[in-house]
């Protein structure tokens, strides 16, 4: 079992496999079913970060406790389980304050990680380029800043009034100044990188740009590989890639640029969205969005709505978009009973697919990046949209198509 010193300032997980329990609270307008969906995803996040989940704890409360997040009785139940099992860390599905982390570490004698810290840990591990590493570090600093006071455990032993004046407070101010200075340096560095990226995007501005968008782990990179014959990293884990990959593709002598962008997720830390705005410019500045969804995921429609809401936040909701229902092979395998006839299967499938097409305004194409089912239809759809935009925006380049 990993050792953990209470009050130690640290972030993220150790690199060896750790044994975790996860904790969620049903509060506000949330339902227990919705929380269980979140905790399923949190378990997958923990697995991606290198942890195995032993048990989950759920409690209904009007609002989270401001000291221990869960109620006193539930906290004691968690503590008893930890004492009797080989547990390394406790992962909470919501963000915790520095004070809550401090109190929970003292109570459980184990490392405490919240959802944002876990996601930031995964991003930190997977960032490959200077831009991605800078964006993650900026998000970590911005997340840490308001939590500095709670992380200084020795302040609680000080006597004092309103501001707890004394040497400890000076140490906090020193830390805060250091973090603020670091944030400014990182923002300046990102600004420089972003200016370079803007220049690069201007250099390719005479080409139609298509971006693959979607929830994390829906198969965007696999589709990118099939369309471009490129070797884009693919893994069955959340946030397999953070850096936007751009490939030039030609279909029927019509060239365009295809981008594989970072996946979205529910409850994505605000600071992470802010830090990755320059990367997400690839989405905002695209001419066409291909919204990829995982048909085999039982929470597919929730994920679809999450992506649509994120696109609105990015100001990309008016970009021409169509939806690719990926992994249709796995969807049909989950949908059909073995005793059904082919005609019955076809009828059931048509009803289900009509539901999606009637409930969402964008056009749909149902395909599989593995079996290549309906991939010709996908390529034809992209070709038609690209050709229309190309001829509208860049009519003077029409004669150049013959070179491809």
Image (tube, grey):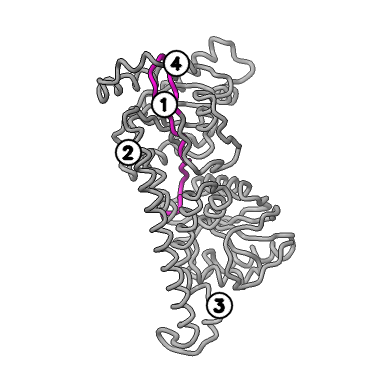
Which numbered disc flags the more N-terminal residue, 3 or 4?
A: 3
Label 3 to label 1, Cα distance in Å? 52 Å
Name which residue lies at 37% across and 13% down. 402
Q: Identify the magenta region.
A: 248-270
Q: Which residue is mark 2?
A: 316
Q: Residue at x 38, y 18 (%)?
A: 254
Residue corresponding to mark 1: 356
Helix or strand or loop: what does disc 4 sit on? helix
For disc 3, the marked residue is 153
Helix, strand or loop at mark 1: helix
Q: Is 366 rendered above or below residue 310?
A: above
Cα separation, mark 3 vs mark 4, equals 60 Å
Q: Which is more N-terminal, label 2 or label 1? A: 2
Which dot, 1 or 4, sits closer to the camera? 4
Q: Which residue is mark 4?
A: 377
| Whether label 3 touches label 4, CB < 8 Å | no
């Amino acid at each position: 079992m990993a050792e953990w010193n209470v009050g130690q300032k640290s972030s993220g997980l150790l690199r060896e496999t750790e044994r975790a329990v996860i904790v969620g609270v049903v509060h506000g307008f949330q339902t227990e079913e919705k929380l269980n969906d979140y905790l399923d995803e949190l378990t997958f996040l923990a697995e991606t970060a290198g942890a195995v989940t032993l048990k989950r704890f759920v409690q209904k409360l009007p609002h989270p406790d401001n000291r221990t997040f869960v109620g006193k009785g539930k906290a004691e139940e968690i503590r008893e389980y930890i004492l009797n099992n080989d547990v390394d860390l406790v992962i909470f599905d919501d963000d915790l304050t520095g004070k809550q982390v401090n109190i929970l570490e003292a109570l459980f004698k184990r490392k405490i990680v919240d959802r944002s810290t876990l996601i930031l840990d995964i991003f930190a591990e997977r960032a490959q380029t200077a831009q991605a590493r800078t964006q993650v570090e900026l998000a970590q600093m911005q997340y840490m800043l308001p939590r500095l006071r709670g992380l200084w455990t020795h302040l609680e032993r000080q006597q004092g009034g309103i501001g707890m004046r004394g040497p400890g407070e000076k140490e906090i101010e020193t830390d805060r100044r250091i973090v603020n200075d670091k944030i400014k340096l990182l923002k300046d560095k990102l600004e420089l990188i972003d200016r370079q990226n803007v220049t690069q995007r201007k250099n390719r501005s005479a080409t139609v740009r298509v971006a693959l968008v979607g929830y994390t782990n829906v198969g965007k990179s696999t589709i990118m590989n099939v369309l471009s014959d490129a070797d884009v990293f693919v893994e069955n884990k959340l946030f397999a890639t953070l850096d936007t990959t751009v490939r030039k593709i030609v279909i029927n002598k019509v060239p365009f640029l295809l981008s594989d962008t970072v996946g979205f997720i529910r409850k994505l830390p605000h600071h992470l969205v802010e830090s990755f705005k320059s990367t997400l410019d690839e989405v905002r500045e695209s001419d066409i969005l291909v919204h990829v969804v995982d048909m085999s995921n039982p929470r597919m429609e929730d994920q679809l709505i999450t992506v649509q809401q994120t696109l609105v936040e990015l100001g990309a909701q008016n970009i021409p978009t169509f939806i690719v229902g990926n992994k249709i092979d796995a969807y049909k395998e989950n949908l059909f009973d073995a005793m059904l006839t082919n005609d019955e299967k076809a009828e059931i499938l048509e009803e289900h697919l009509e539901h999606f097409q009637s409930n969402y305004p964008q056009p749909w194409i149902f395909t599989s990046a593995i079996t290549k089912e309906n991939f010709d239809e996908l390529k034809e759809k992209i070709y038609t949209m690209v050709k229309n935009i190309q001829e509208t925006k860049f009519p003077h380049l029409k004669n150049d198509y013959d070179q491809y």
